[in-house]
Image: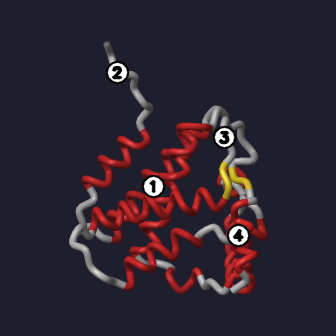
Amino acid sequence: MNIEKFLRAAEVQRWHTVHATKTQTVAEHQWNVWVIARAIYDMLFPIPHNSDESALVSTLALTHDVHEIVVGDIPSTGKDLMSITEENALEEYEHRVMRTQFGINPAANRGTLAEAIVKLADRVEAAHFARKYVTTPGVRGSTTLAVTQQFAVCVDMAPHLSWGKIASDVINLLLPEREDEE
């Protein structure tokens, strides 16, 4: 493992195509996703246990965008303009970068609950950042829609789990802050 390559995540900027009052790096984003993913996982499985899935959630959260160190951050607004073929080619390229440059095989975890939790946390983090710092019109709504869509994927994947508390916490995180009335 080349530690220097991983440390470059602190230098790669996200949200570069929109107006934001704060910059965010890939490293900061991955850390925030880890915090949210761990909270979601711990709410779903409140009894402390030592599991491979718990460790996988942490690993995926902390490395899910490591390819951006090489490729750069391509925002969803740019990906939305791609055809399915182009988007699939980009995903394959990103996965190849993860395998060859960082020794991570994202395909090994495709379709797992851990992957779904991290995708939900990724979208929640983006929506939270957009709500707090992005001033470009339309971005907040599209990030919130992405959270809703991924939440539905998670519930469909594991309907037996308790998603209600998570939904409540996510909604509270994404609601605009209200000033206390005096």
Dot 3 crowding, Cα within 10 Å, few <14, some 14–19, many 20+: few
Q: CA distance from mark 1 to mark 2?
A: 32 Å
Q: Looking at the rendering, in which quadrant would you find the N terminus?
A: bottom right
Q: Position of residue 100 (x, y in %)?
A: 73, 86
Q: Nearer the viewer, mark 3 or mark 4?
A: 4
Q: Residue at x 33, y 83 (%)?
A: 51
Dot 2 crowding, Cα within 10 Å, few <14, some 14–19, many 20+: few
Residue 105 found in image quarter: bottom right
Q: Which residue is mark 3?
A: 22
Judged left or right of residue 126, residue 117 is left
Does residue 157 lie above or below 23 as drawn? below
Judged left or right of residue 165, residue 91 is right
Dot 1 crowding, Cα within 10 Å, few <14, some 14–19, many 20+: few
Marks 1 and 4, the one that precedes in the sequence? 4
Q: Which residue is mark 1?
A: 149
Q: Nearer the viewer, mark 2 or mark 4?
A: 4
Q: CA distance from mark 1 to mark 4?
A: 32 Å
Q: Which residue is mark 4?
A: 7
Residue type beneath disc 1: Gln
Residue type beneath disc 4: Leu
Q: Position of residue 50 (x, y in %)?
A: 31, 82
Q: Residue at x 38, y 85 (%)?
A: 52
Does residue 134 lie above or below 14 as drawn? above
